[in-house]
Image: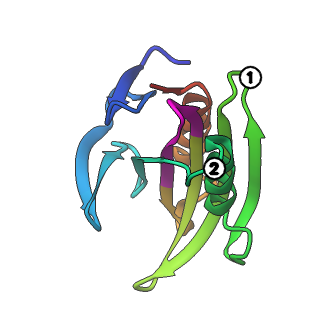
Amino acid sequence: MNEDWKAVEWAGTVRFRVPMGWTVSSEDREGIEVLAFAPNNSGGGAFRVLTDERAPRPGEPAEAVLHEMALRFVRPDDARVSDRSVEEREDGARLAQAMMVTEEDGRTESHYLWLLGRVCDGRARVAMFSYTVPALFDGQEPHVSNLAGLDAAIRAAELL
């Protein structure tokens, strides 16, 4: 990974890398604190991270909770979603990915989504990442390079 990236830790749950020059802030989304980054060269791109942790119901293994969270994340019944995948990393973590196109307030946006999760202390712990691009600029630089770098960074991310 390029040395122009820096390590970021969020919510005591996940450590990952982002480009050095990206502006960082946090947002409140329905009572959930979300870490947000604005690429300086993006033409409107945004990268967001949030975390969650769930305990299994009595008698249910935490692995089943993680599996369900990963499958729900890729939204199998949502026609707006494509390029779905769920895979297991060598360290036992799950990586779910999907891409979604939405239209809101007359704007069409492409959303690239990742969920990285693993079982920690008998609970399912996940970090969810999204990179949003105005559809007009999807497939153009710098978004293509940003997306490739983020995908590599998320694949290498560490759940704490």
Q: Nearer the viewer, residue 58 or 105?
A: 58
Q: Which mark is residue 59?
A: 2
User: Which amino acid does the dot numbered 1 rest on?
Assistant: Glu
Q: Residue at x 50, y 30 (%)?
A: 121
Which tag, 1 or 2, sits closer to the chain's start? 2
**In the rendered image, which residue does mark 1 sit on?**
90
Disc 1 + disc 2, Cβ < 8 Å: no
Q: Residue at x 61, y 59 (%)?
A: 73
Estimate the x, y position of residue 60 in percent, counting from the top left.
64, 50
Identify whether 85 is placed above or below 93. below
**In the rendered structure, does residue 90 fall within the stretch colored magenta?**
no
Assess disc 1: are there few (<14), some (14-19) or many (≥20) residues with their C-alpha within 10 Å of its C-alpha: few
Q: Which mark is residue 21?
A: none
Foreground mark, 1 or 2, reads 2
User: Which amino acid does the dot numbered 2 rest on?
Assistant: Gly
Instruction: Measure the alpha-carbon separation of dots 1 and 2.
Output: 27 Å
Estimate the x, y position of residue 36 in percent, counting from the top left.
32, 48
Identify whether 42 is placed above or below 133. above
Identify whether 15 is placed above or below 42. above
Image colouring: rainbow
- Position of the C terminus, as image quadrant, is top left
Question: At numbered mark 1, what does the secondary structure look like: helix, strand or loop?
Answer: loop
**Magenta highlight range:** 117-131
Question: At numbered mark 2, what does the secondary structure look like: helix, strand or loop?
Answer: loop
Estimate the x, y position of residue 133 in percent, counting from the top left.
50, 59
- Position of the N terminus, as image quadrant, is top right
Which residue occupies the extreme bottom position in the image?
106
Q: Residue at x 31, y 36 (%)?
A: 11
Which residue occupies the extreme front position in the image?
59
Estimate the x, y position of residue 46 in percent, counting from the top left.
40, 53
Q: Residue at x 39, y 43 (%)?
A: 41
For the stretch drawn in magenta, what is the main secondary structure?
strand
